[in-house]
Image (tube, helix red, strand yellow):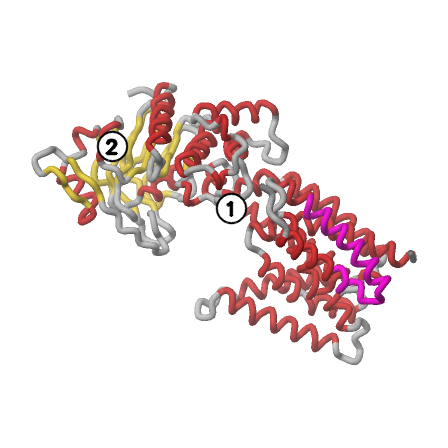
Amino acid sequence: MSGIELRAMLEVVLAGGFCGALGFWVLSERLAYGAESLSHGLLPGLVLAGLAGAPLLVGAAGGAVAAAALIALAVRDPRAGPDTGTAVAVTGLVGLGSLLALAPDAPQRLEELLFGDPLGATDTDLVAAAVLLAAGGAALASLHRPLVATSFDAAGAGALGLRPALVRLALLAMLAAAIAVAVQGLGALLVLAVLVAPPVAVRRHVRTPAATMLAGAVVAALAGVLGIQLSSLAGTAAGASVALVLCAAAAAGAALPARA
Amino acid sequence: MSERAVFAQDLAVGYGGPPVLREVSFAVAAGQTVCVLGPNGGGKTTLFRALLGELEPADGTVSVSGRPAYVAQTERTRLDFPVSAFDVALMGTLARGRWWLPPRPDDRAAARRALGRVGLADQAEVPFGELSGGQRQRALLARALVQDARVLLLDEPLSGVDPASAGLIDSVFADLRGEGRALLVSSHDVESARGFDLVLCLHRRQVAFGPPGEVLHRATLEATYGRELIVLDEAGPARAVTVQHHEHGPHEER
């Protein structure tokens, strides 16, 4: 196995480990559509970072903030409704990102930004993924009890002295950070797989939120390793291979009999 | 009067617009139980939200002894969320602060004691969504008990509850009263209000407040419920039931 493949595995294990755990809350708080919108909407930020020669992480973070602001603005139009407003805003952002990426001066190929390239993980990418796992994991652990109480019964959580709106804001911040880091490995289109597929794979087989998060992290890391191996053997695109293994795990987990 | 637990004076509360509940003035002492009667949209939940500090008074004042515990209707909880009865009771310890740390052994002991008080010791590890309606209500009551609050607000705790659970909940109410805690219980059941120390009738404003014998009369109940009131015994003082018209509008259950 080459050094490039080892770095790719490390990237998907570190970023996937956090995303697989966070995915429980994405599903629980019904944020899958929001996560998809955010990951697609940050494409212009990625392209602009490529054009400016800046790290893609910076572009992803800036793109996520800009996309979130535009989506927040679009959903305020009562005539269209939130879903339509989000769809229009995201489609516009993907169109803008594609336009920029297809410009003659664009150094980054569009398919790399859309579908990711874990084999191209740099030292900065690995450090970012490690920081995400460490800091994000600590945040998830310290917010675990407020998240459980808020997700179970928001009104009751408020009466316990918690602030459900702040708890949800913290969750959204973690989601944005996870997407900004993981999008470099899996691209704007496939990053959703690492957030949604792991909890789908495990949720019928474990009982508690903590166990679902832990199992989701393990599934995401294993799927990452298997996907890179598969791409090496079959000569397929690494990011897409990881995404397909993740989705296969989700399908298998959903098909297996639930724990009694 | 002994120690005052809840006090409201000329209280008016709204959701940013005109007040949806106004002219509310009452006082509850420690150890007293209050039945809050009113139709859907009459202001029961709005009053509770004001007492919890979630809504600022548009006018008047309100004060509560300490942070009140709140028992929501079970319909407002997530039945598909993977928590056990014990986990729900343990949530009550979040009111002690330290939310960023795992629960301590004494937190766990408090949750187990509370489950024992509501008769759920043997169902501690059962997922909340698999409990019966009455057992779920008791698990939420256990969460409130763990909070160890001086004032408890309970939103229709006996609605749709099996007789065994209703009996257990009633006996816990009696214990709490004996411990000097104040209970405000919203209800649609006019007849059950007779068992409380005080009755507060709301219909977008305070219609009446006082002992059941002074409040539960036909004129008061008609002013409270309007066309939702059916008087079963014309000769009696107020043998009445209410028919609820559940409307799922944006301000349902206010």
Direction from residue A214 to residue B23 in the image, left or right: left
Q: Is residue A8 above or below residue B93?
A: below
* Magenta-colored stretch includes residue B8: no
**Residue, far right:** A2
Pick the residue in front: B141 or A174: B141
Q: Is residue B254 above or below residue B156?
A: below
**Residue, far left:** B235
Per the rendering, the mark at residue B80 is 1
Single out the mark in the foreground, 1 or 2: 1
Q: Residue at x 50, y 30 (%)?
A: B123
Direction from residue A234 to residue B101 in the image, left or right: left
Q: Residue at x 22, y 43 (%)?
A: B242
Pick the residue in front: B117 or B133: B133
Q: Residue A250 in the image: x percent, y percent?
A: 66, 55
Q: Residues within 10 Å of mark 1 (few under 14, many from 20)?
A: few
Dominant secondary structure of the magenta stretch? Answer: helix
Per the rendering, the mark at residue A100 is none
Q: Earlier in the sequence, mark 1 or mark 2?
A: 1
Q: Is residue A214 above or below residue B125?
A: below
Residue annotated with mark 2: B193
* Magenta-colored stretch includes residue A222: yes
Chain holding disc 2:
B
Q: Residue at x 79, y 58 (%)?
A: A227
Q: Residue A198 in the image: x percent, y percent?
A: 67, 52
Direction from residue B4 to residue A197 in the image, left or right: right
Chain part drawn in magenta: A215-242
Q: Residues within 10 Å of mark 2 (few under 14, many from 20)?
A: many
